[in-house]
Image (cartoon, helix red, strand yellow):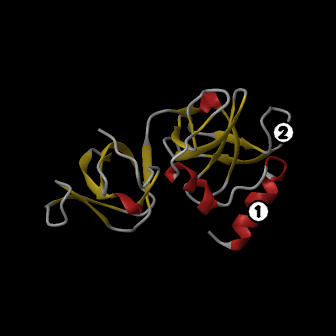
Amino acid sequence: MTVLRQVLACVFVLWAGCVPAQDAAGPAATTSETRGPVTNLPLPRFVSLKANEANVRRGPSLSHRIDWVFKRRDMPLQVIAEYGHWRRVTDHEGMGGWVHYSLLSGNRTVIVQRDMLPLLARPVEASPQTAILERGVIAELDECSRDWCRLVAGGHRGWASKPVLWGVFPHEIRE
């Protein structure tokens, strides 16, 4: 993330405190888990965008200004704070703000962060490829081991290396 983007992200959410993009994923790796005051779910956590469009506001109410609009259905987002019916989220670039909870889904997705990522038949480097994913592809997240995640994208299923996916924690195991 560029310094300018980080500064802009901080300015947009200054009243709520700035969480730099690299810190947003870090707390989940700690041993003590923070829980949201509204849902009692872990913070931070990943969700996806349920709607085709979602207004991203400066604060947690309809009276706050809309800073921008997310326009990608199923985009993975990270919830970093809760207030009433509002969730403070960030995207894979560290940009975010407050979104109404009704626009979010618990369905897990990831965004591919490496171009021409091979989707493999098994979680082994020498496994045959089932597809190749371009950078920016959004895929459904299935199961994850320590180093691999099984994805579904464009009708193709396969395994991808976890470090090149945004939307899953490095330590996260899913069965």
Mark number for residue 102?
Answer: none
Pick the front one: 94 or 172:
172
Mark number for residue 64?
Answer: 2
Q: Earlier in the sequence, mark 1 or mark 2?
A: 1
Q: Amino acid at mark 2?
A: His
Q: Quadrant of residue 120?
A: bottom left
**Percent of width and height locating residue 86:** 70, 32
Vertical arrangement, residue 43 with respect to residue 129, above or below: above
Quadrant of the snapshot with the N terminus: bottom right
Q: Is residue 37 left or right of residue 33?
A: right
Q: Is residue 135 left or right of residue 154?
A: right
Residue extending farthest bottom: 3
Q: Is residue 11 left or right of residue 170?
A: right
Pick the front one: 163 or 104:
163
Quick one: label 2, few (<14), some, or many (20+) residues within 10 Å?
A: few
Q: Give the residue at mark 1.
A: 8
